[in-house]
Amino acid sequence: MSVFDGLKFRKVYSPIHNLDPRMKFAYVIAIFVVAIIFYQVIPLLVLFFMQIPFVLLARVQRQWLRSLRGAAFLAAFIFIINVVTTYFTSGYTFTAINIENSTAMTLRFIVLVESFSVFFLTTSPDHLGLALEESRVPYEFAFAFTTAVRFVPVLAEEAQTIMDAQKARGLELEKGGLLKRIRNYIPILIPLIVSAIRRSLELAEAMESRAWGAAKKRTNLYSLKLHKGDFALLAITIGILALAVYAHFNVAVPTVSSLLGF
Amino acid sequence: MALIEIKNLTYTYPGASKPSINDVSLKVEKGEFVLITGPSGCGKTTLCRCFNGLVPHFYQGELKGEISVAGLDTLKHHTYEMAKHVGLVFQNPENQLFALSIEKDVAFGLENNGVDRVEMRRRVDEVLQQTGIYDIRERSPHEISGGQQQRVAIAAVLAMEPEIIVLDEPTSFLDPLSAQKIFEVIFKLNREQGITVILVEHRLDLTAKYTNHLIVMDEGKIRFEGDPRQILSNEETRLIGVGIPKATLLYQMLKKEGLNLNNATPLSSEELADQLLEALKVE
Ligand SMILES: Nc1ncnc2c1ncn2[C@@H]1O[C@H](COP(=O)(O)OP(=O)(O)OP(=O)(O)O)[C@@H](O)[C@H]1O
Ligand SMILES: [Mg+2]
Protein backbone atom coordinates (compact mmCIF):
# COMPACT_ATOMS: atom_id res chain seq x y z
CA MET A 1 0.00 0.00 0.00
CA SER A 2 3.04 2.27 0.30
CA VAL A 3 2.65 3.45 -3.30
CA PHE A 4 -0.84 4.76 -2.60
CA ASP A 5 0.21 6.40 0.64
CA GLY A 6 2.49 8.77 -1.21
CA LEU A 7 -0.27 9.72 -3.62
CA LYS A 8 -2.95 10.43 -1.10
CA PHE A 9 -3.14 13.78 0.56
CA ARG A 10 -3.97 13.39 4.20
CA LYS A 11 -6.36 15.87 5.68
CA VAL A 12 -4.55 17.30 8.66
CA TYR A 13 -5.49 20.43 10.48
CA SER A 14 -2.59 22.53 11.66
CA PRO A 15 -1.88 26.25 11.71
CA ILE A 16 0.28 25.76 8.63
CA HIS A 17 -2.29 23.71 6.70
CA ASN A 18 -4.87 26.40 7.30
CA LEU A 19 -2.74 29.16 5.80
CA ASP A 20 -3.75 30.64 2.50
CA PRO A 21 -1.93 28.76 -0.29
CA ARG A 22 -1.14 32.03 -2.07
CA MET A 23 0.67 33.35 0.99
CA LYS A 24 2.54 30.10 1.42
CA PHE A 25 3.54 30.24 -2.20
CA ALA A 26 4.81 33.81 -1.82
CA TYR A 27 6.83 32.67 1.18
CA VAL A 28 8.37 29.79 -0.77
CA ILE A 29 9.29 32.14 -3.62
CA ALA A 30 10.89 34.53 -1.12
CA ILE A 31 13.00 31.72 0.35
CA PHE A 32 13.88 30.74 -3.19
CA VAL A 33 15.07 34.27 -3.99
CA VAL A 34 17.09 34.59 -0.79
CA ALA A 35 18.72 31.22 -1.43
CA ILE A 36 19.79 32.50 -4.86
CA ILE A 37 21.09 35.84 -3.52
CA PHE A 38 23.49 34.23 -1.04
CA TYR A 39 26.23 31.83 -1.95
CA GLN A 40 27.76 31.48 1.54
CA VAL A 41 27.26 28.64 3.95
CA ILE A 42 26.13 30.63 6.97
CA PRO A 43 23.04 32.39 5.53
CA LEU A 44 22.03 29.21 3.71
CA LEU A 45 22.30 27.26 6.95
CA VAL A 46 20.10 29.89 8.60
CA LEU A 47 17.56 29.47 5.79
CA PHE A 48 17.66 25.71 6.23
CA PHE A 49 16.95 25.86 9.95
CA MET A 50 14.28 28.52 9.52
CA GLN A 51 11.98 25.98 7.82
CA ILE A 52 12.08 23.59 10.73
CA PRO A 53 9.56 25.41 12.95
CA PHE A 54 7.07 25.27 10.04
CA VAL A 55 7.62 21.56 9.63
CA LEU A 56 7.13 20.96 13.33
CA LEU A 57 4.04 23.17 13.53
CA ALA A 58 2.52 21.33 10.58
CA ARG A 59 3.49 17.97 12.09
CA VAL A 60 4.78 16.64 8.79
CA GLN A 61 8.31 15.88 9.96
CA ARG A 62 8.19 12.23 8.87
CA GLN A 63 7.12 12.99 5.28
CA TRP A 64 9.47 15.95 5.20
CA LEU A 65 12.45 13.79 6.21
CA ARG A 66 11.44 11.28 3.56
CA SER A 67 11.45 13.95 0.85
CA LEU A 68 14.88 15.16 2.04
CA ARG A 69 16.18 11.62 1.92
CA GLY A 70 14.83 11.43 -1.61
CA ALA A 71 16.88 14.50 -2.51
CA ALA A 72 20.03 13.20 -0.80
CA PHE A 73 21.36 11.41 -3.87
CA LEU A 74 21.07 14.50 -6.06
CA ALA A 75 22.58 16.62 -3.29
CA ALA A 76 25.60 14.32 -3.05
CA PHE A 77 25.95 14.48 -6.82
CA ILE A 78 25.92 18.29 -6.80
CA PHE A 79 28.52 18.32 -4.04
CA ILE A 80 30.90 15.98 -5.84
CA ILE A 81 30.58 17.79 -9.18
CA ASN A 82 31.33 21.09 -7.45
CA VAL A 83 34.34 19.74 -5.56
CA VAL A 84 35.75 18.12 -8.69
CA THR A 85 35.32 21.18 -10.93
CA THR A 86 36.83 23.54 -8.35
CA TYR A 87 39.69 21.05 -7.94
CA PHE A 88 40.50 21.48 -11.63
CA THR A 89 39.81 25.23 -11.87
CA SER A 90 41.85 26.13 -8.79
CA GLY A 91 45.08 24.50 -9.87
CA TYR A 92 44.67 20.90 -8.72
CA THR A 93 44.37 21.59 -5.00
CA PHE A 94 41.68 20.98 -2.41
CA THR A 95 41.22 24.13 -0.38
CA ALA A 96 38.96 24.66 2.59
CA ILE A 97 37.22 27.51 0.80
CA ASN A 98 36.47 25.34 -2.22
CA ILE A 99 34.95 22.67 -0.06
CA GLU A 100 32.94 25.33 1.68
CA ASN A 101 31.62 26.78 -1.57
CA SER A 102 30.62 23.33 -2.76
CA THR A 103 28.80 22.81 0.53
CA ALA A 104 26.97 26.11 0.00
CA MET A 105 25.81 25.06 -3.49
CA THR A 106 24.53 21.81 -2.08
CA LEU A 107 22.82 23.58 0.79
CA ARG A 108 21.13 25.92 -1.67
CA PHE A 109 19.66 22.95 -3.47
CA ILE A 110 18.52 21.39 -0.21
CA VAL A 111 16.84 24.62 0.89
CA LEU A 112 14.89 24.76 -2.37
CA VAL A 113 13.74 21.16 -2.06
CA GLU A 114 12.92 21.68 1.57
CA SER A 115 10.75 24.74 1.14
CA PHE A 116 8.83 23.31 -1.83
CA SER A 117 8.21 20.10 0.02
CA VAL A 118 6.83 22.02 2.99
CA PHE A 119 4.50 23.82 0.60
CA PHE A 120 3.19 20.67 -1.06
CA LEU A 121 3.02 18.69 2.16
CA THR A 122 0.85 21.30 3.83
CA THR A 123 -1.38 22.46 0.98
CA SER A 124 -4.40 20.32 0.16
CA PRO A 125 -5.07 19.84 -3.57
CA ASP A 126 -8.52 21.27 -2.90
CA HIS A 127 -6.95 24.45 -1.57
CA LEU A 128 -4.53 24.56 -4.44
CA GLY A 129 -7.36 24.23 -6.97
CA LEU A 130 -9.23 27.00 -5.20
CA ALA A 131 -6.15 29.21 -5.25
CA LEU A 132 -5.80 28.57 -8.97
CA GLU A 133 -9.43 29.53 -9.50
CA GLU A 134 -9.17 32.69 -7.44
CA SER A 135 -6.00 33.70 -9.26
CA ARG A 136 -8.15 33.90 -12.42
CA VAL A 137 -6.79 30.72 -13.93
CA PRO A 138 -9.64 29.47 -16.18
CA TYR A 139 -11.91 27.14 -14.22
CA GLU A 140 -11.32 24.29 -16.67
CA PHE A 141 -7.68 24.10 -15.60
CA ALA A 142 -8.44 24.15 -11.90
CA PHE A 143 -11.11 21.49 -12.48
CA ALA A 144 -8.73 19.34 -14.51
CA PHE A 145 -6.17 19.61 -11.74
CA THR A 146 -8.46 18.59 -8.87
CA THR A 147 -10.10 15.83 -10.92
CA ALA A 148 -6.69 14.43 -11.81
CA VAL A 149 -5.78 14.35 -8.13
CA ARG A 150 -9.13 12.73 -7.35
CA PHE A 151 -8.55 9.90 -9.83
CA VAL A 152 -4.89 9.15 -9.10
CA PRO A 153 -5.65 6.64 -6.33
CA VAL A 154 -8.50 5.15 -8.38
CA LEU A 155 -6.26 4.56 -11.38
CA ALA A 156 -3.42 3.30 -9.19
CA GLU A 157 -5.75 0.72 -7.70
CA GLU A 158 -7.01 -0.25 -11.11
CA ALA A 159 -3.46 -0.68 -12.43
CA GLN A 160 -2.78 -3.00 -9.50
CA THR A 161 -5.91 -5.04 -10.23
CA ILE A 162 -5.03 -5.37 -13.92
CA MET A 163 -1.49 -6.35 -13.02
CA ASP A 164 -2.72 -9.07 -10.68
CA ALA A 165 -5.20 -10.32 -13.28
CA GLN A 166 -2.57 -10.50 -16.02
CA LYS A 167 -0.07 -12.18 -13.70
CA ALA A 168 -2.72 -14.74 -12.83
CA ARG A 169 -2.94 -15.49 -16.55
CA GLY A 170 0.79 -16.12 -16.71
CA LEU A 171 2.23 -12.72 -17.58
CA GLU A 172 5.78 -12.43 -16.26
CA LEU A 173 6.76 -8.84 -15.65
CA GLU A 174 10.30 -9.29 -14.36
CA LYS A 175 11.61 -11.42 -17.19
CA GLY A 176 14.02 -10.64 -20.03
CA GLY A 177 16.22 -7.71 -20.96
CA LEU A 178 15.31 -4.08 -20.65
CA LEU A 179 13.35 -3.87 -23.92
CA LYS A 180 11.51 -7.09 -23.17
CA ARG A 181 10.62 -5.81 -19.73
CA ILE A 182 9.15 -2.64 -21.16
CA ARG A 183 7.18 -4.72 -23.65
CA ASN A 184 5.89 -6.83 -20.76
CA TYR A 185 3.90 -3.83 -19.59
CA ILE A 186 1.85 -3.52 -22.79
CA PRO A 187 -0.83 -5.99 -21.63
CA ILE A 188 -1.25 -3.81 -18.56
CA LEU A 189 -1.21 -0.44 -20.28
CA ILE A 190 -3.80 -1.25 -22.93
CA PRO A 191 -6.64 -2.29 -20.58
CA LEU A 192 -5.70 0.61 -18.34
CA ILE A 193 -6.00 3.13 -21.17
CA VAL A 194 -9.21 1.63 -22.51
CA SER A 195 -10.78 1.75 -19.09
CA ALA A 196 -9.57 5.33 -18.52
CA ILE A 197 -11.21 6.41 -21.77
CA ARG A 198 -14.47 4.74 -20.82
CA ARG A 199 -14.24 6.35 -17.40
CA SER A 200 -13.70 9.80 -18.90
CA LEU A 201 -16.78 9.39 -21.10
CA GLU A 202 -18.89 8.51 -18.10
CA LEU A 203 -17.44 11.47 -16.24
CA ALA A 204 -18.28 13.81 -19.09
CA GLU A 205 -21.82 12.49 -19.11
CA ALA A 206 -22.16 13.02 -15.36
CA MET A 207 -20.74 16.55 -15.63
CA GLU A 208 -23.23 17.46 -18.37
CA SER A 209 -26.05 16.10 -16.23
CA ARG A 210 -24.94 18.32 -13.35
CA ALA A 211 -25.26 21.52 -15.36
CA TRP A 212 -21.65 21.90 -16.48
CA GLY A 213 -21.39 25.16 -18.40
CA ALA A 214 -24.82 26.49 -17.36
CA ALA A 215 -23.87 29.91 -16.01
CA LYS A 216 -21.30 32.28 -17.44
CA LYS A 217 -20.15 33.21 -13.98
CA ARG A 218 -19.55 30.17 -11.82
CA THR A 219 -19.69 30.39 -8.03
CA ASN A 220 -17.76 28.38 -5.50
CA LEU A 221 -18.78 26.70 -2.25
CA TYR A 222 -15.54 27.76 -0.64
CA SER A 223 -13.66 31.01 -0.74
CA LEU A 224 -10.18 31.88 0.35
CA LYS A 225 -10.15 34.44 3.12
CA LEU A 226 -7.05 35.91 4.67
CA HIS A 227 -6.79 35.33 8.41
CA LYS A 228 -4.42 36.62 11.07
CA GLY A 229 -1.93 33.85 10.37
CA ASP A 230 -1.77 34.80 6.72
CA PHE A 231 -0.88 38.39 7.55
CA ALA A 232 1.74 37.14 9.99
CA LEU A 233 3.23 34.97 7.27
CA LEU A 234 3.18 37.92 4.88
CA ALA A 235 5.01 40.03 7.46
CA ILE A 236 7.60 37.27 7.94
CA THR A 237 8.04 36.98 4.18
CA ILE A 238 8.58 40.71 3.72
CA GLY A 239 10.88 40.79 6.76
CA ILE A 240 13.06 37.99 5.42
CA LEU A 241 13.29 39.60 2.00
CA ALA A 242 14.14 43.04 3.43
CA LEU A 243 16.73 41.64 5.80
CA ALA A 244 18.29 39.55 3.06
CA VAL A 245 18.56 42.43 0.63
CA TYR A 246 20.00 44.70 3.35
CA ALA A 247 22.52 42.06 4.43
CA HIS A 248 23.49 41.35 0.87
CA PHE A 249 24.52 44.95 0.24
CA ASN A 250 25.78 46.04 3.65
CA VAL A 251 27.15 43.07 5.56
CA ALA A 252 30.29 41.19 4.66
CA VAL A 253 29.21 37.61 5.35
CA PRO A 254 32.13 35.75 6.93
CA THR A 255 33.03 32.29 5.73
CA VAL A 256 33.13 29.35 8.09
CA SER A 257 36.78 28.73 7.15
CA SER A 258 37.82 32.22 8.17
CA LEU A 259 35.93 31.90 11.45
CA LEU A 260 37.72 28.65 12.16
CA GLY A 261 41.03 30.29 11.23
CA PHE A 262 42.02 28.37 8.09
CA MET B 1 -50.15 17.95 -19.69
CA ALA B 2 -48.23 15.20 -17.94
CA LEU B 3 -44.82 15.90 -16.42
CA ILE B 4 -43.13 13.65 -18.96
CA GLU B 5 -44.69 13.02 -22.33
CA ILE B 6 -43.01 10.95 -25.00
CA LYS B 7 -44.68 10.29 -28.35
CA ASN B 8 -43.43 7.77 -30.90
CA LEU B 9 -39.81 8.18 -29.91
CA THR B 10 -37.28 6.35 -32.06
CA TYR B 11 -33.57 6.85 -31.53
CA THR B 12 -30.50 5.39 -33.23
CA TYR B 13 -26.94 5.91 -31.92
CA PRO B 14 -24.51 7.26 -34.51
CA GLY B 15 -23.18 4.39 -36.58
CA ALA B 16 -25.62 1.84 -35.11
CA SER B 17 -27.54 -0.31 -37.57
CA LYS B 18 -30.80 -0.51 -35.65
CA PRO B 19 -32.56 1.86 -33.26
CA SER B 20 -32.00 1.41 -29.52
CA ILE B 21 -35.35 3.03 -28.74
CA ASN B 22 -38.10 1.95 -31.09
CA ASP B 23 -41.40 3.80 -31.26
CA VAL B 24 -41.81 4.40 -27.54
CA SER B 25 -44.72 6.40 -26.16
CA LEU B 26 -44.95 7.14 -22.46
CA LYS B 27 -46.64 9.42 -19.95
CA VAL B 28 -45.50 10.04 -16.41
CA GLU B 29 -47.58 12.15 -14.03
CA LYS B 30 -46.20 14.38 -11.32
CA GLY B 31 -45.37 12.53 -8.09
CA GLU B 32 -45.30 9.07 -9.60
CA PHE B 33 -42.81 6.33 -8.72
CA VAL B 34 -42.08 4.60 -12.02
CA LEU B 35 -40.10 1.39 -12.23
CA ILE B 36 -38.48 0.38 -15.52
CA THR B 37 -37.10 -3.09 -16.04
CA GLY B 38 -36.14 -5.39 -18.88
CA PRO B 39 -33.31 -7.61 -20.10
CA SER B 40 -29.80 -6.29 -20.66
CA GLY B 41 -29.43 -4.18 -23.78
CA CYS B 42 -33.15 -3.44 -24.14
CA GLY B 43 -32.60 0.33 -24.10
CA LYS B 44 -33.25 1.34 -20.49
CA THR B 45 -30.11 3.44 -20.17
CA THR B 46 -30.75 5.02 -23.55
CA LEU B 47 -34.26 6.00 -22.45
CA CYS B 48 -32.82 7.57 -19.28
CA ARG B 49 -30.46 9.63 -21.42
CA CYS B 50 -33.46 10.95 -23.35
CA PHE B 51 -35.05 12.39 -20.21
CA ASN B 52 -32.40 15.07 -19.71
CA GLY B 53 -31.29 15.58 -23.28
CA LEU B 54 -27.99 13.66 -23.17
CA VAL B 55 -29.66 11.97 -26.10
CA PRO B 56 -29.39 13.62 -28.57
CA HIS B 57 -27.20 16.58 -27.44
CA PHE B 58 -24.29 14.60 -26.00
CA TYR B 59 -24.65 11.39 -28.01
CA GLN B 60 -25.77 12.90 -31.34
CA GLY B 61 -27.41 10.20 -33.47
CA GLU B 62 -30.83 10.25 -35.07
CA LEU B 63 -33.95 10.98 -33.07
CA LYS B 64 -37.55 10.93 -34.26
CA GLY B 65 -40.71 11.67 -32.34
CA GLU B 66 -41.63 14.10 -29.58
CA ILE B 67 -40.38 14.34 -26.05
CA SER B 68 -41.35 16.88 -23.44
CA VAL B 69 -40.03 16.84 -19.88
CA ALA B 70 -41.27 19.31 -17.25
CA GLY B 71 -42.84 21.28 -20.05
CA LEU B 72 -39.57 21.60 -21.97
CA ASP B 73 -38.77 20.09 -25.35
CA THR B 74 -35.45 18.31 -24.77
CA LEU B 75 -34.52 18.78 -28.41
CA LYS B 76 -34.53 22.53 -27.95
CA HIS B 77 -33.09 22.69 -24.43
CA HIS B 78 -29.57 21.71 -23.57
CA THR B 79 -28.67 19.17 -20.90
CA TYR B 80 -27.48 21.92 -18.57
CA GLU B 81 -30.91 23.56 -18.72
CA MET B 82 -32.68 20.24 -18.19
CA ALA B 83 -30.43 19.57 -15.17
CA LYS B 84 -32.51 21.96 -13.06
CA HIS B 85 -35.58 19.82 -13.69
CA VAL B 86 -34.22 16.30 -14.11
CA GLY B 87 -31.47 14.76 -11.98
CA LEU B 88 -29.74 11.72 -13.42
CA VAL B 89 -27.98 9.19 -11.17
CA PHE B 90 -25.78 6.68 -12.96
CA GLN B 91 -24.88 3.07 -12.44
CA ASN B 92 -21.23 3.42 -11.46
CA PRO B 93 -20.97 5.58 -8.36
CA GLU B 94 -17.25 6.10 -8.77
CA ASN B 95 -17.38 7.80 -12.15
CA GLN B 96 -19.88 10.47 -11.26
CA LEU B 97 -17.98 12.06 -8.39
CA PHE B 98 -15.15 14.35 -9.34
CA ALA B 99 -14.39 16.66 -6.43
CA LEU B 100 -11.96 16.04 -3.60
CA SER B 101 -14.55 16.30 -0.88
CA ILE B 102 -18.11 15.10 -0.70
CA GLU B 103 -19.71 18.44 0.06
CA LYS B 104 -17.83 20.03 -2.82
CA ASP B 105 -19.22 17.36 -5.10
CA VAL B 106 -22.74 17.97 -3.87
CA ALA B 107 -22.24 21.67 -4.55
CA PHE B 108 -20.97 21.11 -8.10
CA GLY B 109 -24.30 21.60 -9.87
CA LEU B 110 -25.12 24.69 -7.82
CA GLU B 111 -21.71 26.19 -8.55
CA ASN B 112 -22.29 25.62 -12.24
CA ASN B 113 -25.61 27.40 -11.99
CA GLY B 114 -24.00 30.36 -10.27
CA VAL B 115 -26.03 30.03 -7.04
CA ASP B 116 -24.69 32.38 -4.36
CA ARG B 117 -22.65 30.99 -1.51
CA VAL B 118 -25.08 31.39 1.38
CA GLU B 119 -27.94 29.73 -0.49
CA MET B 120 -25.56 27.05 -1.75
CA ARG B 121 -24.38 26.24 1.77
CA ARG B 122 -27.98 25.93 2.97
CA ARG B 123 -29.03 23.60 0.18
CA VAL B 124 -25.89 21.47 0.41
CA ASP B 125 -26.32 20.95 4.15
CA GLU B 126 -30.00 20.17 3.69
CA VAL B 127 -29.49 17.42 1.11
CA LEU B 128 -26.53 16.00 3.02
CA GLN B 129 -28.85 15.55 5.98
CA GLN B 130 -31.65 14.10 3.87
CA THR B 131 -29.42 11.41 2.41
CA GLY B 132 -27.71 10.67 5.71
CA ILE B 133 -24.15 11.61 4.73
CA TYR B 134 -23.78 14.86 6.66
CA ASP B 135 -21.20 13.38 9.02
CA ILE B 136 -18.85 12.32 6.24
CA ARG B 137 -19.14 15.53 4.21
CA GLU B 138 -15.46 16.40 4.41
CA ARG B 139 -14.09 13.04 3.33
CA SER B 140 -12.83 12.32 -0.13
CA PRO B 141 -14.96 10.12 -2.43
CA HIS B 142 -12.18 7.57 -2.45
CA GLU B 143 -12.48 6.99 1.27
CA ILE B 144 -16.15 6.00 1.43
CA SER B 145 -18.11 2.87 0.50
CA GLY B 146 -19.97 2.36 -2.77
CA GLY B 147 -23.30 2.79 -1.00
CA GLN B 148 -22.19 6.10 0.44
CA GLN B 149 -20.83 7.18 -2.95
CA GLN B 150 -24.21 6.49 -4.51
CA ARG B 151 -25.89 8.58 -1.82
CA VAL B 152 -23.51 11.41 -2.63
CA ALA B 153 -24.56 11.13 -6.27
CA ILE B 154 -28.21 11.31 -5.21
CA ALA B 155 -27.53 14.27 -2.92
CA ALA B 156 -25.67 16.00 -5.74
CA VAL B 157 -28.67 15.90 -8.06
CA LEU B 158 -31.11 16.67 -5.23
CA ALA B 159 -29.22 19.87 -4.44
CA MET B 160 -30.40 21.31 -7.75
CA GLU B 161 -33.99 20.78 -6.56
CA PRO B 162 -35.24 18.86 -9.59
CA GLU B 163 -38.87 17.81 -10.05
CA ILE B 164 -37.75 14.46 -11.43
CA ILE B 165 -34.98 12.08 -10.43
CA VAL B 166 -33.97 9.34 -12.84
CA LEU B 167 -31.83 6.54 -11.42
CA ASP B 168 -30.22 4.06 -13.79
CA GLU B 169 -29.55 0.83 -11.89
CA PRO B 170 -28.15 2.78 -8.95
CA THR B 171 -27.52 -0.32 -6.88
CA SER B 172 -25.96 -2.76 -9.30
CA PHE B 173 -22.50 -2.15 -7.77
CA LEU B 174 -23.79 -2.53 -4.21
CA ASP B 175 -24.50 -5.31 -1.76
CA PRO B 176 -28.19 -6.06 -0.98
CA LEU B 177 -28.20 -4.24 2.34
CA SER B 178 -26.74 -1.01 0.91
CA ALA B 179 -29.14 -1.37 -2.00
CA GLN B 180 -32.07 -1.64 0.38
CA LYS B 181 -30.97 1.56 2.13
CA ILE B 182 -30.66 3.44 -1.17
CA PHE B 183 -34.18 2.36 -2.16
CA GLU B 184 -35.49 3.60 1.18
CA VAL B 185 -33.86 7.00 0.63
CA ILE B 186 -35.39 7.23 -2.84
CA PHE B 187 -38.83 6.15 -1.68
CA LYS B 188 -38.78 8.70 1.11
CA LEU B 189 -37.97 11.49 -1.33
CA ASN B 190 -40.89 10.42 -3.46
CA ARG B 191 -43.37 10.14 -0.63
CA GLU B 192 -42.35 13.07 1.54
CA GLN B 193 -41.28 15.62 -1.02
CA GLY B 194 -43.37 14.55 -3.97
CA ILE B 195 -40.36 14.21 -6.25
CA THR B 196 -41.19 12.16 -9.31
CA VAL B 197 -38.93 9.11 -9.44
CA ILE B 198 -38.00 6.98 -12.41
CA LEU B 199 -36.02 3.97 -11.27
CA VAL B 200 -34.39 1.44 -13.57
CA GLU B 201 -33.84 -1.82 -11.71
CA HIS B 202 -33.33 -5.53 -12.08
CA ARG B 203 -33.91 -6.22 -8.39
CA LEU B 204 -37.69 -6.33 -8.38
CA ASP B 205 -37.65 -8.30 -5.12
CA LEU B 206 -36.70 -5.12 -3.32
CA THR B 207 -38.42 -2.49 -5.45
CA ALA B 208 -41.67 -3.75 -6.94
CA LYS B 209 -43.58 -2.93 -3.74
CA TYR B 210 -42.85 0.79 -4.12
CA THR B 211 -44.51 1.31 -7.48
CA ASN B 212 -47.85 1.13 -9.18
CA HIS B 213 -46.46 2.05 -12.56
CA LEU B 214 -44.19 -0.65 -13.93
CA ILE B 215 -42.67 -0.57 -17.40
CA VAL B 216 -41.19 -3.68 -19.00
CA MET B 217 -38.98 -3.00 -21.99
CA ASP B 218 -37.62 -5.41 -24.56
CA GLU B 219 -35.59 -4.70 -27.70
CA GLY B 220 -36.13 -0.96 -27.55
CA LYS B 221 -39.88 -1.19 -27.10
CA ILE B 222 -42.24 -1.00 -24.16
CA ARG B 223 -43.74 -4.49 -23.87
CA PHE B 224 -45.88 -4.04 -20.77
CA GLU B 225 -46.91 -1.04 -18.79
CA GLY B 226 -49.15 -0.59 -15.78
CA ASP B 227 -50.03 -2.41 -12.56
CA PRO B 228 -47.04 -4.48 -11.38
CA ARG B 229 -49.26 -7.13 -9.74
CA GLN B 230 -50.83 -7.92 -13.04
CA ILE B 231 -47.70 -7.65 -15.17
CA LEU B 232 -45.53 -9.72 -12.87
CA SER B 233 -48.01 -12.57 -12.64
CA ASN B 234 -48.08 -12.76 -16.41
CA GLU B 235 -46.15 -15.73 -17.84
CA GLU B 236 -44.88 -13.69 -20.81
CA THR B 237 -43.10 -11.24 -18.53
CA ARG B 238 -41.01 -14.06 -17.13
CA LEU B 239 -40.15 -15.31 -20.63
CA ILE B 240 -38.76 -11.91 -21.63
CA GLY B 241 -36.20 -12.37 -18.87
CA VAL B 242 -37.58 -10.15 -16.13
CA GLY B 243 -36.60 -11.28 -12.65
CA ILE B 244 -39.99 -11.92 -11.09
CA PRO B 245 -39.93 -11.38 -7.29
CA LYS B 246 -39.57 -14.68 -5.43
CA ALA B 247 -42.61 -13.91 -3.32
CA THR B 248 -44.69 -13.60 -6.50
CA LEU B 249 -43.37 -16.90 -7.87
CA LEU B 250 -43.99 -18.71 -4.60
CA TYR B 251 -47.51 -17.28 -4.46
CA GLN B 252 -48.24 -18.66 -7.92
CA MET B 253 -46.93 -22.09 -6.98
CA LEU B 254 -48.94 -22.21 -3.76
CA LYS B 255 -52.03 -21.06 -5.60
CA LYS B 256 -51.57 -23.85 -8.19
CA GLU B 257 -51.23 -26.37 -5.35
CA GLY B 258 -54.66 -25.26 -4.27
CA LEU B 259 -53.83 -23.13 -1.25
CA ASN B 260 -56.62 -20.70 -0.57
CA LEU B 261 -54.88 -17.30 -0.83
CA ASN B 262 -56.60 -14.04 -1.71
CA ASN B 263 -56.35 -12.72 -5.23
CA ALA B 264 -53.94 -9.79 -4.81
CA THR B 265 -50.56 -10.94 -6.15
CA PRO B 266 -47.90 -10.15 -3.52
CA LEU B 267 -44.80 -8.20 -4.60
CA SER B 268 -42.65 -8.66 -1.51
CA SER B 269 -42.07 -11.33 1.09
CA GLU B 270 -43.84 -9.22 3.73
CA GLU B 271 -47.03 -9.14 1.66
CA LEU B 272 -46.86 -12.87 1.03
CA ALA B 273 -46.29 -13.56 4.72
CA ASP B 274 -49.39 -11.55 5.59
CA GLN B 275 -51.48 -13.47 3.08
CA LEU B 276 -50.23 -16.79 4.40
CA LEU B 277 -51.03 -15.83 7.97
CA GLU B 278 -54.51 -14.82 6.91
CA ALA B 279 -55.07 -18.08 5.03
CA LEU B 280 -53.88 -20.12 8.01
CA LYS B 281 -56.16 -18.25 10.40
CA VAL B 282 -59.24 -19.02 8.32
CA GLU B 283 -58.49 -22.77 8.32
N1 LIG C 1 -22.99 4.90 -26.69
C1 LIG C 1 -23.55 3.98 -27.50
N2 LIG C 1 -23.25 3.94 -28.80
C2 LIG C 1 -23.81 3.00 -29.61
N3 LIG C 1 -24.68 2.07 -29.20
C3 LIG C 1 -25.02 2.05 -27.90
C4 LIG C 1 -24.47 3.01 -26.98
N4 LIG C 1 -24.98 2.76 -25.76
C5 LIG C 1 -25.81 1.71 -25.91
N5 LIG C 1 -25.85 1.29 -27.20
C6 LIG C 1 -26.67 0.18 -27.73
O1 LIG C 1 -28.03 0.48 -27.49
C7 LIG C 1 -28.73 -0.67 -27.05
C8 LIG C 1 -29.42 -0.39 -25.74
O2 LIG C 1 -28.42 -0.19 -24.75
P1 LIG C 1 -28.73 0.33 -23.30
O3 LIG C 1 -27.42 0.61 -22.67
O4 LIG C 1 -29.71 1.42 -23.38
O5 LIG C 1 -29.38 -0.96 -22.65
P2 LIG C 1 -29.77 -1.23 -21.14
O6 LIG C 1 -31.17 -1.69 -21.15
O7 LIG C 1 -29.43 -0.08 -20.31
O8 LIG C 1 -28.85 -2.47 -20.76
P3 LIG C 1 -28.19 -2.86 -19.36
O9 LIG C 1 -29.24 -3.55 -18.56
O10 LIG C 1 -27.11 -3.80 -19.77
O11 LIG C 1 -27.68 -1.61 -18.76
C9 LIG C 1 -27.73 -1.79 -27.00
O12 LIG C 1 -27.90 -2.60 -28.16
C10 LIG C 1 -26.40 -1.12 -27.01
O13 LIG C 1 -25.46 -1.88 -27.71
MG1 LIG D 1 -28.05 0.25 -18.68
Image (cartoon, helix red, strand yellow):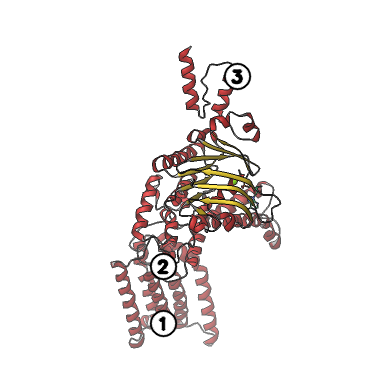
Q: Amino acid at mark 3?
A: Lys
| Residue A111: quarter of image | bottom left
**Disc number placed over residue B11 in the picture, else none:** none
Percent coordinates x, y for residue B259 in the rendering: 55, 16
**Disc number placed over residue A37 in the picture, else none:** 1
From the viewer's side, name the closer residue of B224 and B126: B224
Percent coordinates x, y for residue B237 in the rendering: 62, 33
Identify the residue at image location x=44%, y=74%. Answer: A107
Instruction: Determine whether the residue tagged by mark 2 lies in a helix, strand or loop.
Output: helix
Identify the residue at image location x=52%, y=39%. Answer: B175
Q: Amino acid at mark 2?
A: Ala
Q: Which residue is mark 2?
A: A131
Label 2 close to label 1 by CB (< 8 Å)? no
Q: Which residue is mark 3?
A: B256
From the viewer's side, name the closer residue of B122 and B140: B122
Identify the residue at image location x=46%, y=22%. Answer: B274
Q: CA distance from mark 2 to mark 3?
A: 70 Å
Instruction: Determine whether the residue tagged by mark 3 lies in a helix, strand or loop.
Output: helix
Query: Where is B260 relative to B240, above or below?
Result: above
| Residue B201: quarter of image | top right
Percent coordinates x, y for residue A88 in the rendering: 55, 85
Q: CA distance from mark 3 to mark 1?
A: 94 Å
